[in-house]
Image: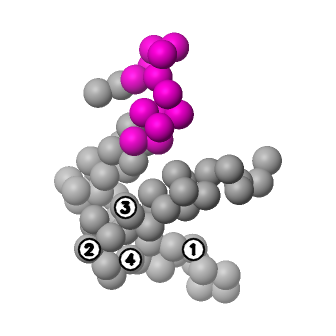
Amino acid sequence: MFLRGPGATLGDIQIEALDTVRAPVSAGLYEIGKVERGVGFVLSTIPLDEGIEEIRSQYVDHYENRQS
């Protein structure tokens, strides 16, 4: 589902973005993890739902705190 219409709320767009991340990760096309200084990409060892929740927390809960 794509919410490209002008009536889409910020919340709708954020949910769509998270679903866009979840789908290819669930299909095994991508992996989630973190980039650590001096190490590089470190694969996540937590279940997908927990990983998506971490992303959601940063992307949705802390959206107003983002750097421009």
Amino acid on which disc 2 is placed? Pro
Numbered tag placed on residue 52 in the rendering? 3
Lower sequence index among marks 1 and 3 = 1
Q: Nearer the viewer, residue 3 or 43?
A: 3
The residue mark sitting in front, 1 or 2, is 2
Magenta includes 5? yes
Determine which residue is flagged by label 4.
Answer: 44
The residue mark sitting in front, 2 or 4, is 2
Residue at 40 percent across and 77 percent down: it is 43
Q: Residue furthest top?
A: 6
Determine which residue is flagged by label 2.
Answer: 47
Lower sequence index among marks 1 and 4 = 1
Find the magenta span and give its range: 3-15
Query: Crowding near pointer 1: few (<14 within 10 Å), some, many (20+)?
Result: few
Identify the element where label 4 is drawn. loop
Numbered tag placed on residue 64 in the rendering? none
Identify whether 45 is placed above or below 60: below
Observer able to see residue 32: no
Quadrant (top left, top right, bottom left, bottom right) of the N terminus: top left
Q: Mark 4 and mark 2 in contact (Cβ < 8 Å)?
A: no
Amino acid on which disc 4 is placed? Ser
Lower sequence index among marks 1 and 2 = 1
Determine which residue is flagged by label 1.
Answer: 35
Report how far apart the C-alphas of labels 1 and 3 lie in the structure. 16 Å
